Structures are given as structure tokens and as C-alpha cells.
């Protein structure tokens, strides 16, 4: 058995299948994980969701901001953006089953005790185990009857820092933002959700989460994440692995095989 984690697929199903073919992926034997944003701006979001859900226990994905945005569009809470290619899912006869599958996905995954997968990465104040435990607080709500209320009220760009005292809705929203939208973090640990630039454009007082001076990630641990295509796969940290290499923007789709640490990529044809 091999386990492949794939960076942001964003509905680029043909590229996903090309990448899986190139590594000799065997459904029913190998495991497939998405780094979040399974769906979004690519042309085949419906096929991507159907493929992942059809693999049963052999495929999974952590949730990304585009996945949550789709759930909000499904509920009529958010209007689709012009770049969103959700219409085929919204018209599909299996729409409800696909929505149900998507909202059962986890916020994080730990393939082993020293490795964390999440869509955006690891908030500097948190240990890997804390990130996973906080993610479970959100998972419980997304899988409950309260999921619609959470999606209706979760959108805020307020720059907040984590506090153990955060409670209720505010706490859930912080966890969602840290695990699905974070890129830059301020000196005093606030999430700056507005800046999307890469490392060649650094603002004073802002750090990428993976090089924040107060980070708790240990050298013998690693974080796998997607979301930040502008990094082009480079974090400058050996243990922070950026898997979103911007296929949807003309870049590559990247997979890492967990057992060997080997990388595989496909570009457009
Ligand atoms: Mn994203």
C-alpha cells in the first residue's frame, strides 16, 4: 500500500487522473488524500468529488476554504463567484450525497505522530496535536445539525490571535481561518487574512506561519499543506512542505508519497 497526498486539485480531475496514472495508483490498494480545495475553479469539480467519494475508505481529504465556500453556496448563503465552477454539482442528481460526503471530511490528518496535514498549515502557537484537536471541534459541528448556522456566520477577515479563552462561535471561526485560510501571521500572532503574496514581497511585522519566530513546530516534525500557490512549493523550511503548486494557474499538480517521501508532478498537456 502507498499513500499519496495531492495538493489543491481545484476541480482539475483530468490532471488528477493523469498524475495518478503516472504513479501507478491502484484503487482499492493505495490510499489517496487531498490537501483541501478538491473543488473550486477548475472545470471538473463534479467529477473530482464523485471520484473521491467513490473510493470509499481509500480516499479522503482535509477541508479547504473553497470546499467550505461550496457548502455555503449549496446552502444559498453565499453567491458563487464568477470563477467558481460549481454549477454542474448544483445541478447533479447526486448533489445531496456529495454535499453530505464533503461535510464529513476532516480539518486535519496526522499520518503519524509527527506529521500534520491541513489545508493552510500550522498556526504558530499550536502543536500538531492541538491543531488536530481544535480541528475536531469544527468537524463535530460540520457533521451536526448546526452546520448551516456555522457556515452562515463564519465569514470574517478580522485579524485575531488565538487565546485559550476563545469560546463558542468565535473560537470555531478562528480555528477554521487558521486551518483553511492562514498565510501570514503578525508579530503578535494575529492572522492577516488579506495578504496573499509570496515570499518575495514581505511586509514588516508579518511572517509566513512556517517561519514565525514563536512557532512551536519542532525540527523532527513536519507539516504538509496546500492553499498558498504563490510559494511555488518553496517555504525555505525543510519540514514545511507546500503541496499547492498552482496547477489551476498554469503550474503543476503535486503529489507526495508518504511512505517514501517522493514527489510526483504533472503539468498541463
Ligand atoms: Mn485554499
Image (cartoon, grey):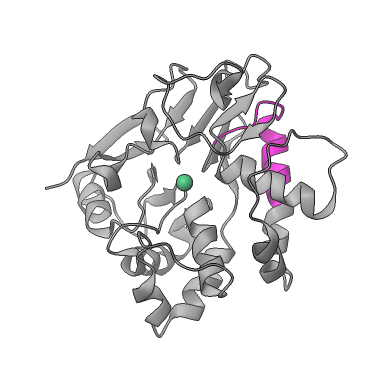
Q: Is residue 228 above or below residue 147?
A: above
Give x and y (percent) for residue 239. 49, 21
Which residue lies at the image location 29% right of the left edge and 48% below the top edge? 248
Which residue lies at the image location 74% right of the left edge and 69% below the top edge? 146
* Residue 128, quarter of the rendered image: top right
Give x and y (percent) for residue 64. 51, 51
For this orientation, the residue located farthest to the bottom is 93
For this orientation, the residue located farthest to the right is 165
Give x and y (percent) for residue 222. 53, 26
Frontmost residue, 43 versus 80: 80
Query: What residue range appears in magenta?
Result: 121-136
Which residue lies at the image location 45% right of the left edge and 65% below the top edge? 56
The answer to whether one can see residue 143 in this image is no
Q: Is residue 191 above or below residue 12?
A: above
The reply to whether the magenta stretch includes residue 129 is yes
Give x and y (percent) for residue 150. 70, 63
Give the total number of marks visible in the rendering. Answer: 0
* Residue 100, quarter of the rendered image: bottom right
Q: Is residue 221 left or right of residue 159?
A: left
Frontmost residue, 14 versus 189: 189
The reply to whether the magenta stretch includes residue 236 is no
Q: Is residue 24 left or right of residue 192?
A: left
Q: Is residue 239 above or below residue 192?
A: above
Frontmost residue, 226 versus 105: 226
Amino acid at each position: 500500500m502507498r499513500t499519496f497526498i495531492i495538493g489543491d486539485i481545484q476541480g482539475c480531475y483530468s490532471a488528477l487522473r493523469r498524475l495518478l496514472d503516472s504513479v501507478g495508483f491502484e484503487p482499492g490498494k493505495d490510499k489517496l488524500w487531498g490537501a483541501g480545495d478538491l473543488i473550486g475553479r477548475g472545470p471538473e469539480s463534479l467529477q473530482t468529488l464523485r471520484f473521491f467519494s467513490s473510493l470509499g475508505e481509500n480516499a479522503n481529504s482535509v477541508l479547504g476554504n473553497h470546499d467550505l465556500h461550496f457548502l455555503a453556496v449549496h446552502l444559498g448563503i453565499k453567491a458563487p463567484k464568477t470563477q467558481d465552477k460549481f454549477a454542474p454539482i448544483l445541478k447533479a442528481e447526486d448533489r445531496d450525497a456529495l454535499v453530505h460526503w464533503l461535510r464529513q471530511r476532516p480539518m486535519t490528518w496526522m499520518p503519524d505522530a509527527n506529521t500534520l496535514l491541513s489545508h493552510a498549515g500550522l498556526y504558530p502557537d499550536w502543536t500538531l496535536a492541538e491543531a488536530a484537536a481544535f480541528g475536531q471541534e469544527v468537524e463535530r459541528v460540520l457533521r451536526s445539525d448546526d452546520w448551516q448556522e456555522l457556515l452562515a456566520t463564519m465569514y470574517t477577515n478580522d485579524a485575531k490571535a488565538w487565546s485559550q479563552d476563545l469560546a463558542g462561535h468565535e473560537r470555531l471561526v478562528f480555528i477554521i481561518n487558521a486551518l483553511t485560510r492562514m498565510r501570514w501571521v503578525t508579530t503578535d500572532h494575529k492572522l492577516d487574512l488579506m495578504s496573499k503574496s509570496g515570499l518575495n514581497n514581505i511586509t514588516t511585522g508579518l511572517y509566513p506561519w512556517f517561519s514565525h519566530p514563536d512557532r512551536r513546530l519542532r525540527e523532527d516534525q513536519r507539516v504538509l499543506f496546500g492553499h498558498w500557490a504563490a510559494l511555488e512549493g518553496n517555504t525555505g523550511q525543510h519540514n514545511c512542505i507546500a503541496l499547492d503548486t498552482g496547477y489551476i494557474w498554469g503550474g503543476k499538480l503535486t503529489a507526495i508519497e508518504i511512505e517514501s517521501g517522493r514527489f510526483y508532478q504533472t503539468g498541463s498537456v
